[in-house]
């Protein structure tokens, strides 16, 4: 009898505890105040109200008067850990729940909110669709935030959970990418580039196990990109901090929208090329999902702000008192900038009227002596460069200007097909170093064959920056011409640099395409959501193929354009024979019988040999880049680079 009583008591307690875990929650209904009366097209507080989503009736619904930025939810009275949600769209509006965000908060204005779920697919009407929630934090306030431009149009909403403060051991990410979710005070939209709005940001990563929460100010950014529907943003933390795995501890960060880049990765590819080419500093960047005031905004690139910082542009920080040598000599960050005329701190160079923005010291910190120093230094470089003695010792521009970094920057621009390479070009100067350096690279949205003005890039016979429809800040192309075409040392230096990139640092078509494939795999889930939010006429895969085809051709194009050092000397091409790659084989034909074929790697090491018969010879090889040399009667008669 006692055992039976114990079992009944245990089962009763278990049922009670189970009910606590999955209990349907109630509370005060909260949300957007005004609904719309569809019959009369007017604002209402009595028709289609927020109360309808909690009445258990699929035939009633909440429709907000405003088309976007609206929501409905519950004040639960105290924090609850949410374990499940349920929802049902307005009858006949199955797709209007797609990209709706479910959020939890502990502040009534939702300034501290984080998402607990993103609805990714349309849902059936006249029934509930349920989703399990995997978020360990407890919330007093929970809500459904309408997707953009659909007025909520929600029939039913349910929350399940248990009381508890919870913790931050497991938070929600809508995809495998880190999530950046921003809330501004008063849920104000970001509509200006000059005015910051205060707010809070949460960056959730590592499968929801890592959280960075900061107070911040946020505003719009960009030039042409600011005119697009998908807006780019600049974030300024209240205190310096590290973000994700980026090296810099900083306040300033950017969110690049990539609206016109349907691969969502052109900047990332260019940054990878910059690292491989060897530029001293390449901005850190990673793809992320972004939400603003509870609305899903799409897949962005979280990136460094180009600024003076120990792990960004690493030059000395200046004080207003640094007005004499050696302190006045650095550090400086400037930008050859076609938009300089709209900036506060800028100048036009004395001889060629090249527009230059002074980025550091900042507008409100630079003093007149510092401004005059960097103006004079740029003008001196320009004066020397365009003089007749521009490479004469004691008068050479090279004594003030670092040619190596300029060539590295040039290679990134040409390999990526960046029309804007000399529209915006950063440069910097250190203290106790006479040289002005070029870099970092920035802004590749229209690179990789994404600009109708210069398409098709690889059909051109000259470098892209020299194409008449390429963009440049006033006369910066003339500056580049002088360095690249007039200086007799530059051709040899460029050849050596390109050879090193091809042999040693991963600038090969195969390696770059592999990087693209890996990044595409990382973006798969996020790109699908992004293009639901921002539909396109082509596909993600189509856009990737454009970049892949371009890069495969571009590497070969640049091999022909830039003299390539192979380490094999005394080769004279006297034969009309044919050398080509076919199905992982080097094919050599139309040479006389008995001609010897030597296959070298790019370090000049002999890999294998073959001998031509009356049909030539086929030599199988592994994937890679090779130099094929044909020798007849002890003399080298032909040589060609071949990519398998």
Image (tube, grey):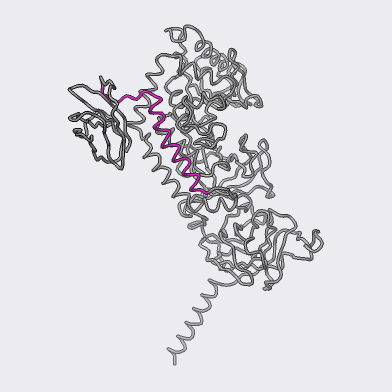
Q: Check residue 384 for magenta coloring.
A: no
User: What secondary structure predominates along the stretch shown in magenta?
Assistant: helix
Above or below, comparing residue 89 to residue 419 in the picture: below
Confirm whether residue 255 shows in the render.
no
440 or 39: nearer the viewer = 39
Task: Tell me which segment is drawn in magenta.
Answer: 539-568
Please give left or right for residue 571 compared with residue 140 in the image.
left
470 or 589: nearer the viewer = 589
Please give left or right for residue 66 compared with residue 300 in the image.
right
Q: Residue furthest front?
A: 614
Residue 317: x and y, percent?
52, 26
Above or below, comparing residue 316 to residue 243 in the picture: above
- Residue at the (29%, 22%) spot, across then down: 573
Q: What quarter of the picture does the N terminus occupy?
A: bottom left
Quadrant of the rendered structure where residue 48 is?
bottom right
Above or below, comparing residue 150 to residue 454 in the picture: below
86 or 186: nearer the viewer = 86
- How many numbered discs? 0
Residue 642: x and y, percent?
31, 33
Above or below, comparing residue 610 to residue 166 in the picture: above
556 or 347: nearer the viewer = 556
Confirm whether residue 329 shows in the render.
yes
Residue 351: x and y, percent?
58, 12
Please give left or right for residue 175 compared with residue 631 in the image.
right
- Residue at the (48%, 35%) spot, across then down: 283
Quadrant of the rendered structure where residue 33 is?
bottom right
Q: Check residue 557 for magenta coloring.
A: yes
Residue 472: x and y, percent?
57, 25
Q: What quarter of the picture does the C terminus occupy?
A: top left
């Amino acid at each position: 009898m006692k055992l039976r009583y114990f079992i009944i008591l245990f089962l009763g307690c278990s049922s009670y505890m189970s009910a606590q875990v999955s209990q349907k929650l109630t509370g005060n209904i909260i949300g957007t105040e005004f609904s719309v009366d569809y019959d009369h097209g007017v604002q209402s507080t009595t028709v289609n109200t927020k109360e309808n989503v909690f009445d258990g009736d699929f035939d009633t619904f909440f429709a907000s008067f405003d088309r976007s930025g609206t929501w409905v939810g519950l004040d639960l009275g105290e924090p609850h850990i949410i374990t499940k949600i349920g929802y049902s769209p307005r009858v006949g509006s199955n797709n209007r729940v797609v990209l709706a965000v479910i959020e939890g908060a502990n502040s009534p204005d939702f300034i501290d909110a984080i998402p607990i779920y993103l609805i990714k697919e349309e849902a059936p009407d006249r029934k509930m669709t349920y989703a399990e929630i995997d978020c360990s934090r407890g919330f007093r306030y929970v809500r459904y935030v309408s997707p953009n431009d659909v007025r909520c149009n929600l029939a039913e909403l349910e929350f399940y959970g248990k009381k508890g403060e919870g913790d931050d051991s497991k938070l929600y990410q809508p995809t495998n990418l880190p999530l950046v979710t921003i809330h501004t005070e008063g849920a104000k939209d970001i509509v200006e580039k000059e005015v910051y709005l205060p707010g809070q940001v949460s960056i959730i990563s590592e499968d929801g196990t890592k959280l960075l929460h900061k107070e911040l100010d946020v505003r719009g950014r960009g030039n042409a990109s600011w005119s697009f529907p998908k807006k780019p943003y600049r974030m300024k933390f209240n205190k310096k901090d590290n973000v994700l795995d980026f090296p810099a501890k900083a306040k300033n960060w950017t969110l690049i929208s990539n609206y016109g880049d349907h691969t969502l990765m052109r900047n990332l590819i260019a940054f990878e090329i910059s690292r491989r080419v060897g530029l001293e500093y390449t901005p850190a960047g990673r793809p992320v999902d972004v939400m603003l005031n509870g609305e899903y905004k799409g897949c962005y690139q979280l990136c460094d702000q180009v600024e003076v910082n120990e792990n960004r542009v690493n030059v000395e920080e200046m004080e207003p008192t640094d007005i004499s040598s050696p302190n006045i000599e650095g550090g400086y960050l400037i930008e050859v900038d076609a938009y300089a005329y709209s900036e506060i701190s800028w100048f036009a160079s004395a001889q060629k009227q090249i527009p230059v923005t002074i980025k550091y010291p900042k507008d409100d910190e630079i003093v007149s002596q510092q401004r005059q120093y960097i103006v004079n230094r740029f003008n001196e470089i320009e004066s020397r460069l365009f003089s007749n003695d521009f490479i004469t010792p004691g008068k050479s521009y090279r004594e003030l200007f670092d040619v190596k970094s300029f060539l590295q920057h040039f290679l990134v621009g040409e390999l990526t097909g960046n029309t804007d390479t000399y529209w915006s070009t950063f440069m910097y100067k250190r203290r106790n170093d006479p040289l002005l350096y070029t870099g970092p690279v920035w802004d590749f949205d229209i690179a990789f064959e994404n600009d109708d003005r210069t398409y098709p890039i690889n059909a051109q016979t000259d470098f892209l920056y020299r194409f008449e429809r390429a963009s440049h800040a006033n006369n910066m192309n003339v500056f580049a011409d002088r360095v690249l075409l007039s200086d007799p040392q530059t051709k040899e230096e460029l050849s050596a640099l390109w050879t090193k990139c091809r042999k040693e640092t991963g600038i090969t078509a195969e390696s770059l395409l592999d990087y693209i494939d890996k990044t595409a795999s990382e973006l798969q889930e996020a790109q699908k959501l992004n293009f639901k939010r921002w539909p396109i006429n082509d596909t993600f895969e189509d856009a990737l193929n454009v970049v892949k085809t371009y890069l495969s051709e571009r590497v070969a194009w640049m091999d022909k354009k830039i003299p390539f050092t192979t380490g094999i000397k005394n080769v004279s091409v006297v034969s009309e024979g044919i050398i080509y790659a076919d199905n992982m084989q080097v094919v050599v034909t139309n040479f006389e019988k008995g001609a010897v074929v030597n296959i070298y790697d790019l370090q000049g090491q002999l890999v294998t040999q073959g001998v031509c018969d009356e049909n030539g010879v086929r030599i199988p090889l592994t994937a890679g880049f090779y130099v094929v040399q044909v020798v007849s009667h002890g003399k080298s008669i032909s040589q060609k680079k071949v990519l398998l």
